């Protein structure tokens, strides 16, 4: 093991390991953001009558960082149906909310409405397409 005795080789290996450990995956700690809106089509409780549509306030929106299955953060939409996840790094994200199942075929009664998003630069704000959901009016 002659190369281990060479201090330059040891320093080069340590430097490469240090640089490799500094790469950051998708997630919090950056300077970018993802924003969007949740738009709801409202129905009665049996989904037999359409009642109207508007941007949906007070709906949870979730974000998954990279290839993670579990969400990394969540927030509620504001009065105009808007949401924003700030301080993100470059990478791939999944942003989603839940819609009621108007077909009444899903045992859970709802399904995920998902948007895949990629942040490619620092200081970038990516706007998703509206997340379209079915809902019943809040009383």
Image: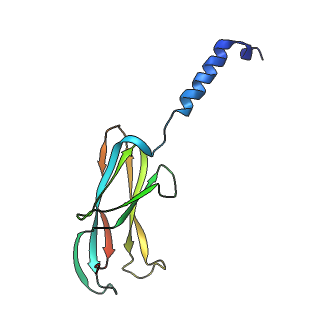
Foreground pick, 16 / 31: 31
Q: Vertical placement of 85 versus 137: above or below? A: above
Work out which residue is located at the far right of the displayed protein and give it: 1
Q: Residue at x 23, y 63 (%)?
A: 80
The location of residue 92, given as percent across then percent down, is 43, 47
**Residue, x 48% and y 38% (percent of image)?**
24
Numbered-mark total: 0
The x, y position of residue 69, in whole percent, is 52, 57
Q: Residue at x 51, y 58 (%)?
A: 70
Residue 65 seen = yes
**Is residue 97 left or right of 125 when viewed as pictured?**
right
Task: Tell me if I can see residue 90 in this picture.
Answer: no
Q: Is residue 37 above or below residue 21?
A: below
For the rendered model, the colour scheme is rainbow
Q: Position of residue 75 (x, y in %)?
A: 37, 60
Depicted 53 relative to depicted 14: above or below: below
Residue drawn at point x = 41 percent, y = 82 percent = 104
Quadrant housing residue 28: top left
Image position of 58 (left or right of 91): left
Q: In the displayed structure, would residue 3 be above or below residue 59?
A: above
Query: Of residues 25 and 49, which is closer to you in this image?
Result: 25
Picture quadrant of residue 81: bottom left
Q: Position of residue 110 (x, y in %)?
A: 42, 74
Indicate the quadrant containing the C terminus: top left, top right, bottom left or bottom right: bottom left
Where is the N terminus found, in terms of image quarters? top right
Q: Which sits in the foreground, 75 or 112?
A: 75
């Amino acid at each position: 093991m002659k190369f281990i005795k060479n201090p330059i080789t040891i320093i080069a290996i340590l430097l490469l390991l240090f640089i490799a450990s500094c790469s950051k995956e998708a997630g919090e700690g950056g300077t970018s953001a993802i924003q969007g809106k949740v738009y709801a089509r409202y129905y009665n409780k049996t989904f037999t009558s359409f009642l109207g549509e508007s941007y949906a306030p007070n709906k949870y929106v979730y974000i998954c960082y990279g290839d993670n299955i579990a969400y990394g953060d969540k927030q509620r939409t504001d009065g105009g149906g808007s949401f924003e996840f700030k301080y993100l790094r470059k990478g791939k994200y999944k942003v989603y909310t839940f819609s009621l199942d108007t077909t009444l075929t899903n045992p859970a009664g709802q399904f995920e409405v998902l948007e895949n998003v990629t942040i490619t630069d620092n200081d970038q704000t990516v706007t998703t397409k509206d997340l379209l959901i079915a809902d019943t009016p809040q009383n």
